[in-house]
Image (cartoon, grey):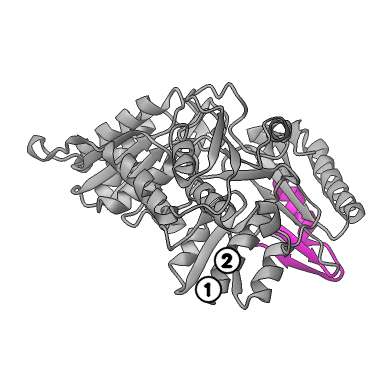
Amino acid sequence: MPKLFGTAGIRARYLKKVNPQLAFNLGLALAKYNDSSGKLVLGHDVRTTSPLLAYALASGAMSGGLDVLILGLAPTPIVAYSTHKTDAKVGVSVTASHNPSEDNGFKVYDSNGMEYTVEMEEEIEELLENIDKDYYVPWDRVGKPISIPNLIEEYVEELIDKFKMMPKRSVRVIVDCANGAAYNITPRILRSLGAKTLTIHCNPDGFFPGRTPEPRPDVLNYLNDLLSSLDAEVAFAHDGDADRLSVLTRKQGFIKQDRLIALYAKLKLSDRKGYIIVSIDVGGAVEEVVERYGGKIIRWKLGKTHEKLKERTNVLLAAEPWKLIDPDWGLWVDGIYQAAWLTNLILTHGSLDDLLKDIPNYPSKRVSIKFDEEKIADVYKDVVEDLLSVKGNVRITTIDGVRLDYDDYSWVLVRKSGTEPKIRIYVEARNRQRLKELTSRVLELIKKHADKRGAKMYSIEGM
């Protein structure tokens, strides 16, 4: 059986790997894993296939003895929050996050609202490989469905209460929900905090007609014009399930994710010292700020920064580009929380541009190259072999892909996506010429091995 779980849960093209039978079996396997008793919280995003997959998973879970607490349409962070709040054994969000509309998948949470670790995912996959009649409970022990839409409102109210205070200034913000699950959540929260909130792509639609749900800089260019024409100060943009957040300001445009993480780290470390956990693709700005404010940085795999939360005490935050876990709020990635925190800061402490003044801004680039699924593994293997053979004054890190750190503080990371048939390139340098040089060098290396393997490069995003 091919490996199901990737960087963040299970994600794939509907009917190719993700289908109603897998959903049913996953529900059944989760029941078996959790001793065939207790509660499972279930929510889903706006995709056309999400309700179908959610009900199939619910049937499997109930067949295995779990009561299913049904949120219905809900952002992924609220599924995690509700799992923790209801003392459920497990939570599942049916979502493909920022993937295209024809994809779908599942994110699984433990009783604390934390995503399953790799070890737990492997145990679930083993159970899925060995579905047996003993996974089912008898008729008098099957689970029951229980509707819990009130948990969505509890989340909204609790988040507003956390940040509600008298604004010292007024601010006009734009919220782009990508036609996704946060369509009626984030705008309400920001209005309640005191922001004058304008919305776009805030009607739920599983075809994502407004824009692709991945909130990349190239996808969000149109917001720069809207910020000016609507006289708005800042724009917030989610992905389909709202665990991600992108931010733009009228003065600076797209704010690099590293700078936002560095700002969060600065705020946390200003109160107390501790650990800042970041993914392998986070750059120099975060390192400099963490060192400046007396913290310690820990790097880990993309999509798995939560695993390090279990290993350390005094962790102040765990973050990767677009995604933030603040343990003072919860142990889950939460883009809605990010938007609320930043809005509170802007209303009470000044513009985001001012808040970012002492945060470094180094030139960087992120590029994604899409391949045939049949060819990508071979191409990536060849590229990795070449990168590992690089000589000279360079530090090589292999915890997630291959990262090369040079003595001029520039670096390159090449890794295979865990959710799509793409090879991703991450580059940062101290000047644009060096950035261009390193990016071109890696692209040429990938193209060389693609040609050698006869692999077609379908698209290059981010150039």
The spot of residue 104 in percent (x, y) is 48, 32
On-image quarter of the C terminus: top right
Q: Is residue 60 above or below residue 86?
A: above
Q: Nearer the viewer, residue 131 or 440?
A: 440
The spot of residue 107 in percent (x, y) is 43, 43
Amino acid at pointer 1: Asp
Q: Is residue 229 above or below residue 294?
A: above
Q: Is residue 18 above or below residue 122?
A: above
**Mark 1 = which residue?**
271
Please state if 426 lies on the left or on the right of 14 as rendered.
right
Mark 2 Cα within 10 Å, few/some/many (few <14, many 20+)? few
Please state if 264 lies on the left or on the right of 431 as rendered.
left
The spot of residue 249 in percent (x, y) is 69, 44
The local secondary structure at tag 2 comes to: helix
Is residue 458 rendered magenta in the image?
no
Is residue 150 visible in the rendered image? The answer is yes
Q: Which quadrant of the view contains residue 130?
A: top left
Q: Which residues are magenta?
A: 380-407
**Mark 2 = which residue?**
267
Residue at 84% in and 70% down: 407
User: Cβ–Cβ below 8 Å for labels 2 and 1?
Assistant: yes
On-image quarter of the N terminus: top left
Amino acid at pointer 2: Leu
Q: CA distance from mark 2 to mark 1?
A: 7 Å
